[in-house]
Amino acid sequence: MKHIENIQKMFSKSFVENPLVESFEAGKIHLPTGKLVACDPLITRDMNSFLVQFPIGEFPVLIHKERQSHCVAYVEVVFRNEFVDYWEMALTEGQEIRQLKAGEIFGYPVESGMGCLMDVKVQESLNRLEDRLYQRRGADFKGIYEEFFHHHFFDENGAIDQFAYLKPADDDEGGLFAFETGYGEGFYASYIGFDQHQNPVKIVTEFIEILN
């Protein structure tokens, strides 16, 4: 569990102090149910939400880049401005820490180089959008990335950003936060920081481990 020890050193305070990391606010995510999903949306349509019930509302998202590579190393969502008392690996249904062998993690696979955080209600909306686009375009359907995500990350001049806040439908109460994942493909864990009253303070997904 060395990863948690490093996460604890880096993220328990309200700001990150590490010369190898560049941090900045990337916007806010709205969670209408507080049931948070983390996944590669291009390969996983029905990812289980985390077991922890997060607060309902709008919360700041911070991006932490590896300064040398400019790649996204961590994505953080802050629910409360409190000191983190302890950390746990984020789990979904059927996962237990005791199932893990030394060095193993629970997380989500990425094959597209893109991950996202979203409320489970937004995941349902994204699936409905994909189904509608497929029915409408038929054989011309190029996939949900080309039809929905691509133009937020690329234009005719190439890459325009490493993250985007998107709504699958205009009337969605919430939205999804999509972003590049570290160096690309991989299997990535998330960690939840709790206060002394067992309330979730923040969640951090790690894509590149940067020692503190």
Image (cartoon, rainbow, N blue to C red):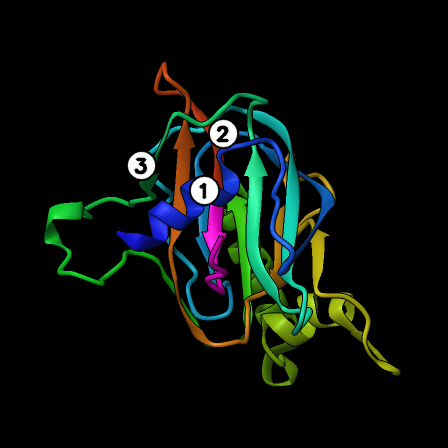
143 up-or-down from 56: above or below:
below
135 or 8, nearer to the observer: 8
Secondary element at tag 3: loop
Residue position for label 2: 33
Mark linked to residue 86: none
Kindly indicate the quadrant of the structure image that contains residue 79: top right
Mark linked to residue 51: 3
Tell which circle, 3 or 2, labels the residue nearer the N-terminal end: 2
Chief SS of the magenta region: loop
Q: Amino acid at mark 3?
A: Leu
Mark linked to residue 9: 1
Q: Amino acid at mark 1?
A: Lys
Mark 2 neighbour class, 10 Å CA radius: few under 14, some 14 to 19, many 20 or more: some
48 or 87, nearer to the observer: 87
At horizontal 34% and vertical 20% (from top left) the residue drawn is 198
Span highlighted in magenta in the image: 204-212
Point out residue 40 in the picture as x, y percentages from the top left corner: 48, 64
Alpha carbon separation for disc pair 1 and 2: 30 Å
| In the image: residue 87, left or right of residue 130 | left
Tell which circle, 1 or 2, labels the residue nearer the N-terminal end: 1
Tell which circle, 1 or 3, labels the residue nearer the N-terminal end: 1
80 up-or-down from 103: above or below:
above
Point out residue 196 in the picture as x, y percentages from the top left corner: 37, 17
Q: Nearer the viewer, mark 1 or mark 3?
A: 1
Q: Amino acid at mark 2?
A: Thr
Point out residue 61 in the picture as x, y percentages from the top left corner: 64, 42
CB-based contact (under 8 Å), mark 1 and mark 2: no
Alpha carbon separation for disc pair 3 and 2: 13 Å
